[in-house]
Amino acid sequence: MSLPTGLFYAQGVKANVLFFDKKPASETAWTKKLWIYDLRTNKHFTLKTNPLRREDLEEFVTLYNAGNRQQRQATWSAEQPEGRWRDYSYEDITARDKASLDIFWLKDDSLADSDNLPAPEVIAQEIVEDLQAALEQFKLIAGDLGAELTEPA
């Protein structure tokens, strides 16, 4: 599942949740399909003004179908290009450059249509959170390098 930025780590950090089944070693791959749910594209969550809620995950929980995974149905297709739930075959994944899992298929509306941008206060809040996250990361790096950090007055 591709999650919105900043949910598990600092703002600006993109997170993915991976679900695995424990299987014994095999000469052939156990994986036949990789299922991906995109909760990132065209979704705008912030820590304070629009936090992720349980109801935002309902579609994923239903589509994941933990009780009967063989009956999963994708919501994405050529006819349904806005579907957030999609599968890729093992062959599709291994054919990608270095078997990259950097996969996206939904069109980001904010990049294509400037009339569809989030409200200015949402953009401003996301910028502030990204800058704060970057500052925290640089503080950690500076600390690892032995720098004496002083807080601005």
Image (cartoon, rainbow, N blue to C red):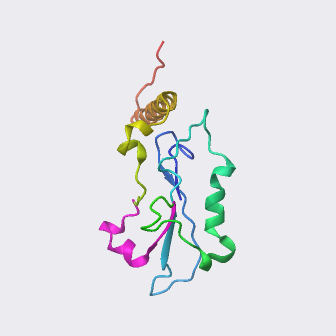
Q: Taking 123 as reference, is 104 above or below it?
A: below
**Where in the figure is residue 126, as x and y percent of width and height?**
49, 34
User: What residue do we see at 61% from left, 66% from top?
Assistant: 63
The answer to which of 48 and 112 lies nearer the viewer is 112
Q: Residue at x 48, y 47 (%)?
A: 42
Q: Residue furthest bottom?
A: 27
Rendering quarter of residue 57? bottom right
Above or below for 78 versus 151: below
Residue 93 in which image quadrant:
bottom left
Q: Nearer the viewer, residue 72 or 82?
A: 82
Q: Position of residue 12 (x, y in %)?
A: 46, 41
In the depicted view, which residue is nearer to us: 70 or 20? 70
Where is residue 95, by image quadrant? bottom left
User: How many numbered dots are placed on residues in this image?
Assistant: 0
Left or right: residue 94 versus residue 127 is: left
Q: Residue furthest left?
A: 97
The boundaries of the magenta stretch are 84-102
> Residue 1 lies in magenta, yes or no?
no
Residue 23 appears at what percent x and percent y? 57, 80
Residue 90, horizontal then vertical, whole percent: 42, 77
Residue at the spot x=65%, y=62% of the render? 61
Residue found at the very far top of the displayed protein: 153
Can you say whether 112 is above or below 147 in the image? below
Question: Is the residue 2 above or below the residue 46 in the image?
Answer: below
The residue nearer to you, when weighing 120 against 147, is 120
Residue for point 48% across, 30% down:
132
